[in-house]
Image (cartoon, rainbow, N blue to C red):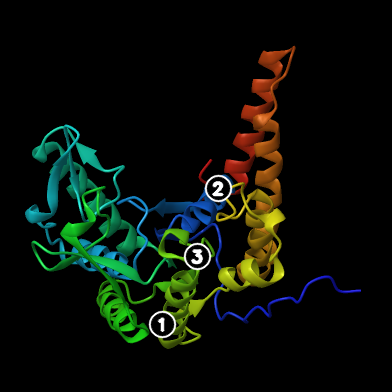
Amino acid sequence: MKWVTEVNLPKYTFDVNHRQKQVFLGSCFATHISSKFSYFGFNQVYNPFGVLFSPIACANRISSALLEKPLSQEHIINRDGHFFSFDAHSEIFGSTTAALQERLDEASQKLRVALLESDVLFLTLGTAFVYRYLHTGSFVANCQKLPGNQFEKVLLTADEITNELQSSFDLLRQNNPNIKIVLTVSPVRHTRDGLIENQRSKAQLLLATAKLSNKETVVYFPSYEIMTDELRDYRFYESDLIHPNQIAVDYIWEKFEASFFSTETIQICKAVRNFRSFEAHSPQSKINLHFDKLAAIKSDLISKYPFLQL
């Protein structure tokens, strides 16, 4: 007896493996998948500018990093004794404008190098709602807790999202012709917008990913559909009833493995999982022996798979 209606996973023309480099951009759902990649020893870079929810913010950060274009000084504000930028998450801040600018420059350079060197870009889109800063007329990545009357809330259309992302993808392809792009839509619901509005927002993102996908170099992984259809029960959510819990993340990860990983990659992941389990164990006695054995296991893994990031 079947208990769920399973999402049919597409057949992808490329795989994802430990010998590659990966870069993750986008909403907080990208955090879950990126942390899995880190746990299993992949060589990856995650959101140098912090979590980015809107496709416009992602497209702008890709383009500005590749063009080495400085971020707008007009988007730097002073709040609670610290300086923040509308173009980055609030985790990026400085005690002075110079300190903030240094962090922004470092993030941009880190992203640029990652985009130029990576084999795969994973881009997770969170919402089609964006905010225009009325003072400059530009869309922002984060309102930085400023009063809402300084912004205009806009629902992007699928065509607007497609055009912005396609421009950044074209620029990326010029600089890194062989990079593959995996698009996902975050299953995290933006309930502050309202449930009806959230559905309309996700619909625009889903339409845009369909327009952008070409089945060869830009593909779509259905994490949104897996969460909302196969895992439609609230037991798969955190207590806030919005974010997927660890069971859901692990389930989606297994689907990802089946879609993108070769037999060798899955075997390597199993070996790394054994190492991580031993690493997490806290012995009550013979501590030195435990750490000697841990070092030996790690050394053996690195010797066998020198590309692992442990």
Give coordinates of residue 110: x percent, y percent. 28, 51
Q: Look at discs 1 and 2 and give the one toward the viewer.
A: 1
C-alpha separation, residue under disc 3 versus residue under disc 1: 14 Å
Helix, strand or loop for disc 1: helix
Badge 2 crowding class, 10 Å Cα cut-off, few under 14, some 14 to 19, many 20 or more, is some
* Residue displayed at 64% across by 49% down: 246
Mark 2 = which residue? 41
Badge 1 crowding class, 10 Å Cα cut-off, few under 14, some 14 to 19, many 20 or more, is many
The numbered dot on residue 208 is 1
Give coordinates of residue 147: x percent, y percent. 21, 51
Give coordinates of residue 57: x percent, y percent. 28, 64
Q: Look at discs 2 and 3 and give the one toward the viewer.
A: 3
C-alpha separation, residue under disc 2 versus residue under disc 3: 24 Å
* Residue displayed at 57% across by 51% down: 36
Label 3 close to label 1 by CB (< 8 Å): no
Report whether 221 appears left or right of 268: left
Mark 3 = which residue? 186
Q: Which residue is farthest right?
A: 1
**Mark positioned earlier in the residue sequence (3 or 1):** 3
Would residue 157 be visible to someone looking at this image? yes
C-alpha separation, residue under disc 1 versus residue under disc 2: 32 Å
Quarter in which the N terminus is drawn: bottom right
Report whether 197 appears left or right of 231: left
Quarter where residue 92 is shown: top left
Callout 2 amino acid: Gly
Helix, strand or loop for disc 2: loop
Label 2 close to label 3 by CB (< 8 Å): no
* Residue displayed at 49% across by 74% down: 199
Quarter where residue 123 is shown: bottom left
